[in-house]
Image (tube, helix red, strand yellow):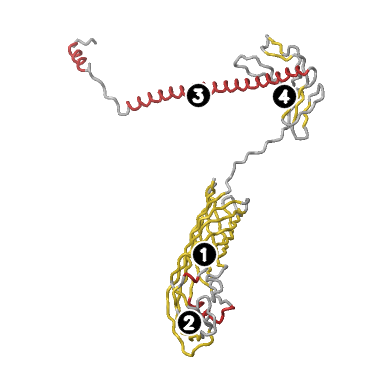
């Protein structure tokens, strides 16, 4: 049936002429994703192609350089063979150090002289033309060179250079030489070390009486000192330079500061000594011999502490015993030369049993002591070690001046830490 109403058709056509349906949600994202995948695929293909070209080029270059190296080696061997014509029928020698010796004619030998040096004797070759070009195979073939035996692999020749056939190794003409291996180079290692340490010691004094001056000392002095003195903690610092004598032992020397602390508490009553001045000789501190004791007593009551600061020069030997790759044990023995630099506090008079202040002229100018210690050390780096030590020290010489009636000696024991640095 024919539509006669063309007017309505034209109106509908004009109405829908600019109509565009709405794009469904997510359509544009899908289109963009598809475009990105195509672009990424093209980029990946370009990278794969470039990588393949690069790897192929490097492979061809490496093979060409390797073949060129072998070709030059063959030419050098040929030149050595050619050089034998100068000997006029006598074999020439290649000497590897030491004195040369004549080789047997027309023999390919390797000889070793008394010094352990090797020599190669090469068979003479005709002076005529050594190489003749082979145009068909583009190779140079030796005419009268020594026989070449081995594998018949052909060398790859990407550069178009004339090469010899790759038949290895060359027999007779060049013989392997057993040359003594050179000594391995050892990097110098410093033998010097620097060590710094901190000590915390429990210190105290011990007292004895000079037998020659026993009449100058109160009969109960030692017992009162033993009951009234207690050890106290003292701090110390050390800085030492070490020189390694061998793999096990190191000599050390340096400076050390120590505090000698003693707590005192006296509370007692004792007899008063009797002395006679005429006809007697006083001791180092001006006291006269005791000839008896009065019946009456005197009371003593005192609490405090005494501190003496000492500067020492320690010299000793330290051993090193490794127990693993990181840990080692280091025992040490040290002799210390000390100087008391400061005096404070009180002490008990050995004759009258009175508390008196310490006097500088009582003490020796130089005092010798010894110490023993052992520590566990851990290797932190190539040049650094850290460890914890236990040690004890005691004076060899009495604290007071020589020939004094009383002989006090200091002693200490405690723990410390030390770091050792190897100086390169």
Work out whether mark 2 precedes mark 1 in sequence or the reverse, and give the earlier one.
2
Horizontal relation, residue 86 to residue 189: left or right: right
* Closer to the eye: label 4 or 2: 2
Q: What is the secondary structure assignment of the residue under circle 1?
A: strand
Horizontal relation, residue 350 to residue 125: left or right: left
**Distance between the alpha carbons at the discs numbered 4 and 2:** 105 Å
**Distance between the alpha carbons at the discs numbered 2 and 1:** 35 Å
- Label 4: which residue? 169
- Label 3: which residue? 51
Q: Which mark is residue 352?
A: 2
* Closer to the eye: label 1 or 4: 1
Q: Are dots 1 and 3 in contact, CB under 8 Å? A: no
* Closer to the eye: label 1 or 3: 1
Q: Residue furthest bottom?
A: 295
- Image quarter where the C terminus lies is top right
* Closer to the eye: label 2 or 1: 2
Residue 202: % across, % down:
50, 67
Q: Residue at left 65%, top 22%?
A: 70
Instruction: Give 26 or 343, whichever is nearer the viewer.
Output: 343
Q: Residue at left 58%, top 51%?
A: 243
């Amino acid at each position: 049936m024919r539509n006669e109403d063309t007017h309505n058709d034209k109106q509908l056509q004009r109405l829908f002429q600019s109509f565009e349906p709405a794009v469904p949600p997510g359509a544009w994202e899908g289109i963009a994703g598809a475009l990105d995948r195509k672009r990424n695929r093209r980029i990946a293909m370009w990278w794969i192609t470039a990588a393949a070209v690069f790897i192929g080029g490097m492979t061809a270059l490496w093979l060409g350089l390797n073949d060129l190296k072998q070709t030059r080696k063959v030419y050098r061997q040929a030149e050595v063979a050619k050089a034998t014509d100068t000997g006029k029928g006598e074999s020439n020698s290649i000497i590897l150090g030491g004195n040369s010796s004549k080789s047997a004619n027309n023999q390919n030998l390797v000889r070793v002289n008394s010094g352990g040096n090797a020599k190669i004797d090469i068979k003479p070759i005709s002076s005529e033309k050594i190489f003749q070009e082979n145009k068909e195979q583009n190779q140079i073939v030796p005419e009268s060179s020594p026989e070449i035996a081995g594998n018949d692999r052909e060398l790859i020749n990407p550069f178009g250079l004339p090469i010899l056939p790759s038949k290895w190794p060359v027999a007779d003409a060049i013989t392997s030489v057993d040359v003594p291996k050179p000594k391995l180079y050892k990097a110098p290692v410093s033998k010097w070390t620097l060590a710094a340490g901190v000590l915390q010691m429990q210190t105290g004094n011990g007292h004895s009486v000079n037998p020659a001056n026993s009449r100058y000392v109160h009969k109960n002095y030692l017992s009162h000192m033993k009951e009234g003195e207690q050890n106290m903690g003292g701090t110390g610092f050390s800085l030492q330079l070490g020189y390694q004598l061998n793999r096990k032992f190191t000599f050390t020397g340096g400076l050390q500061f120590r505090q000698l602390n003693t707590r005192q508490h006296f509370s007692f009553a004792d007899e008063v000594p009797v002395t006679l001045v005429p006809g007697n000789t006083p001791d180092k501190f001006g006291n006269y011999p005791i000839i008896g004791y009065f019946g009456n007593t005197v009371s003593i009551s005192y609490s405090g502490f005494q501190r003496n600061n000492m500067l020492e020069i320690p010299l000793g030997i330290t051993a090193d015993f490794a127990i693993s790759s990181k840990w080692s044990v280091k025992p040490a023995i040290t002799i210390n030369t000390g100087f008391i630099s400061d005096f404070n506090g009180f002490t008990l008079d050995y004759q009258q049993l009175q508390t008196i202040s310490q006097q500088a002229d009582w003490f020796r100018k130089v005092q010798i002591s010894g110490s023993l210690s052992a520590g566990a050390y851990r290797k932190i780096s190539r040049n650094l070690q850290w460890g914890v030590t236990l040690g004890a020290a005691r004076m060899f010489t009495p604290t007071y001046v020589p020939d004094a009636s009383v002989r006090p000696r200091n002693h200490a024991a405690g723990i410390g830490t030390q770091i050792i640095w190897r100086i390169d």
